[in-house]
Amino acid sequence: MISKDVIESHGLTEEEYGRILKILGREPGIVELGIFSVMWSEHCSYKSSRIHLRKFPTKGDRVLQGPGENAGVIDLGDGLAAVFKMESHNHPSFIEPYQGAATGVGGILRDIFTMGARPVAILDSLRFGDINLPRNRYLLSGVVSGIAGYGNCVGIPTVGGEIYFDEIYNNNILVNVFALGIVKKDRIFKGVASGVGNPVIYVGSKTGRDGIHGATMASDVFDESSEAKRPTVQVGDPFTEKLLIEACLEVMNAGLIVGIQDMGAAGLTSSSCEMAGRAGTGIDIHIDRVPMRETGMTPYEVMLSESQERMLIVTEPEKEKEVMEVFHKWDLDAVVIGEVTDTKKIRVINRGDMVADIPIESLTDDAPLYERAISPPPYLDVLHDLDMENLPVPEDLNKVLLTLLSVPTIASKEWVFRQYDHMVRTDTVVVPGSDSAVIRIKGTNKGIAMTADCNSRYCFSDPYTGGAIAVAEAARNIVCAGGEPVGLTDCLNFGNPEKPEIMWQFQQAIEGISAVCRKFNIPVISGNVSFYNETNDLSIYPTPIIGMAGIIEDISKCMTQYFKNDGDVLILLGNNSEEIGQSEYLREIHYKIRGVPPHLDLVLEKKVQDLCLYGIKQGIIKSAHDTSEGGLTIALAECCMRSEDKGNVGASIDLSDDIRPDALLFGETQSRIIITVTPENVKALEDAAKTMNTPVKVIGKVGGERLVIRHKSTTVIDLAVYDMANVWRKAIPGYLGETE
Amino acid sequence: MKFAIIVFPGSNCDHDCYHIVKHVLGRPASFVWHKEKDLTQFDAIILPGGFSYGDYLRTGSIARSSPIMTAVEEFAGRGGLVLGICNGFQILLEAGLLPGAMLRNKSLKFICKDLYLRIDNINTPFTLKYFENQVVKMPIAHAEGNYYVDSETYSHLKKNNQIIFRYSGNDGEINDEVNPNGSIGNIAGICNDRGNVLGMMPHPERCGEQILGGEDGYTLFESMLYYVEKMKNKS
């Protein structure tokens, strides 16, 4: 007899339990209840988000696989394809930062090599609370070491990402990991359990008691008792993962398997159900055959364990022996634990006893689907109200610049990416620090540019525009590296979907993202939703992170943001405008989180990006950097500050816009890219701009050792690049009490 | 000239070494699984970087017991060229083919960055194409590269010109400030008595092409090639 408490502790509503009774025509056993509970959890079923996710444009000429598989696939040409996806590991990382982040990396890598692709790059989007609080510094250090510990060991470079700090994440950090792999177009594998009678093979680590109900934990809000959930965080073993990557790619390249899937959230349960669900078959699992780490584990525990580094493989009976040989060569466990059936059911058998017998459709396609209530939050009017009249322009704008350079969100992230092996595989052409990371594809002339972006304060104030800007900025970053954006993946981090204002944020963000995707013809090929990012009733800012990839046809033309030579001419693509709502400047200097995010004009944005990409492809442009947090001045400073051994370069800029100086210098107006060209090429660029009807303006010259900005002949900024770099580089180590 | 690249479970710079030998240097290279026992058909052995056996127990300590290591020892004993990079260096230390041991980096953190090395001995098969005291740029990527030996062995290494690479400034100066990991005497790479076994923490295979930001590492492979194909033939 299943009691009310048991139902509740499984995160199921009364109504959902009623539905289970109807499906089975009887009371479920405890194993069955566990299976329903994880498969119907928000994390696995997307029950609150599915309706909205359908709005994403997912089709395109290059799309070989859209959402619904382990990861999306984009055609790169030359018979190659890129496989990528982004996923969250927020709650585990808050409870146990090292293991939470490490297993986040491990999980997304498995999604990539499951498709037959060799993972070649990792990016991370991280959100932490106020860096002045010790707990947040501990979380930062732990998460960064966890990503490093796992990524470095498996030998996949962590080439980029982004980090924001804001007290809204004090009790709910975000750890989103993006991974990309390369596969031959005709060697793409899917998570299908087809072929009745085919053996189902379990490979990888043994199953332990870790991570039981991880998916359910990820589908609940947080409070003080969450610390007690530490045992539900899985422990990663990157060494086994490395062996799994090699062994799986080996059996796939040898054409030995039918389908493959990793055991991620909800472990053996979701992998077996999803594989059979996609193939329209059934699956029998002999649970007692699963390799176990400890004795006395119950079928319930084995089905729900989220032990890491495990895969489920379906092969044909005649190939079984060869598959086993490959895994044994790599010293990995490989055991036949079941077979594909025509029952359309998942049946779990323990020493001859049937402990679960559930129609698979009821767990996958027919899982609950909710159209949650939606209403705009009441705080918007107050939030949008920004009184510019009573906002004084600071007298010392140099001081403002130095302050902003030391803000952790803007400061150099060297402390972070030095801990990541970002060079292994010898493909990293643009190392972390520039707009996009760039890797080459050996054996071709091509490269791939990758970026991750989202300004969540914009999304809080206006989720539609915030979502749209995240896509526009990601595309701008790709273009600044000389890439043509070809597809995106998203990680949608939001609060409790049972609250109408959170669902409003969600719906608005999706609309905004979709609008830009359509305009720019960039399909959404994979993604992940993370709801319930809420602690003690306080929700995080809506944070829909966009991970984007672009193709660089000629890798020798790829671009960085850094100024190159004295005498080069600075040109601004786009227009300056008076917008400081929701800017870093407003927050850090005036301590205000007010106003609306900058306006996004999609027509102008597209023109600016097209011109930039054209100029790079023509070989006219020598550096390109978009303006984002901290506006024009921070962007200029970032172009000046090169890596230690390459030295700094100054610049001298003259601006004449009729805009108050603080807004001009630090406002975050969109659709702007700063480029440099040689003096001889100014005309070529201007001619192209005229033809393409894109606003451009010569604003200064590269040279000297200082960044000097004049506004209507008044010098507003005049600082040695060395001094700026010093503040910018030392900020994050300084917060952490480290001198290096 | 034929290179063998040993693959241990957890090696992850094996493909990078293969790439530089095969596609940049243009010489045959083969992956050799750690359970193999024969290296007689090769002219040089590379123990690549990575995390053999996950760095469990101690870096390199499990890999040194792999079956292939007997063949590596024999190969080195016959005067064959053995290059250990990063984890490969750590394995050579554990195997006793080179003296000393590795400690955790002074900062206790993994460090990945480009830095400068001064070449202190160009009279080895691995460095003969460099200039005397040349300063080169190469990346490191490790958490345990803090090389340690007792003072007696250190003096011996120095006297015997076995210190090949030291971390330096871009002007070749050796001091604490440019020491990334706390390594004794800023040591980045050493060779054995005979000069045919080299262990180094920096990654020459990561800086062998202009597109990756530098070609200083290429010279090391070029030196090995020159030694084997030209000098050896003469003798």
Image: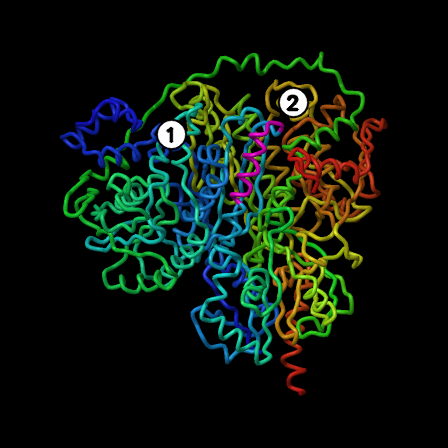
In this figure, which residue is indicated by the disc labeled 1? A219
> Where is residue A274, by image quadrant?
top left
Q: Nearer the viewer, residue A230 or A520?
A: A230
| Amino acid type, callout 1 | Ser
Say what amino acid the circle numbered 2 marks.
Answer: Arg
* Nearest to N terminus: mark 2 or mark 1: 1
Query: Is residue A694 in sight in this rendering?
Result: no
In the rendered structure, does residue A146 fall within the stretch colored magenta? yes
Q: Which residue is mark 2?
A: A587
Q: Which mark is residue A585?
A: none
Quadrant of the drawing holding the C terminus of chain A: top right
Label 2: few (<14), some (14–19) or many (≥20) C-alpha neighbours in 10 Å: some
The chain carrying label 2 is A
Q: Are marks 2 and 1 in contact (CB under 8 Å)?
A: no
Tell whether position A127 is magenta: no
Residue B33 locus on image (x, y percent):
45, 68
Q: Is residue A193 left or right of residue B200?
A: left
Q: Coloured how?
A: rainbow
Q: Camera-side residue: A521 or A265? A: A265
Image coordinates for residue A481, horizontal then vertical, percent: 62, 46
What residue range appears in magenta? A132-147
Determine which quarter of the picture holds residue A125: top right
Q: In the displayed structure, would residue B228 be above or below residue A283?
A: below
Q: Is residue B176 visible?
A: yes
**Residue A653 percent location from the top left of the image:** 80, 35
Query: At which x and y percent is residue A597?
Result: 60, 24
Q: Chain of mark 1?
A: A
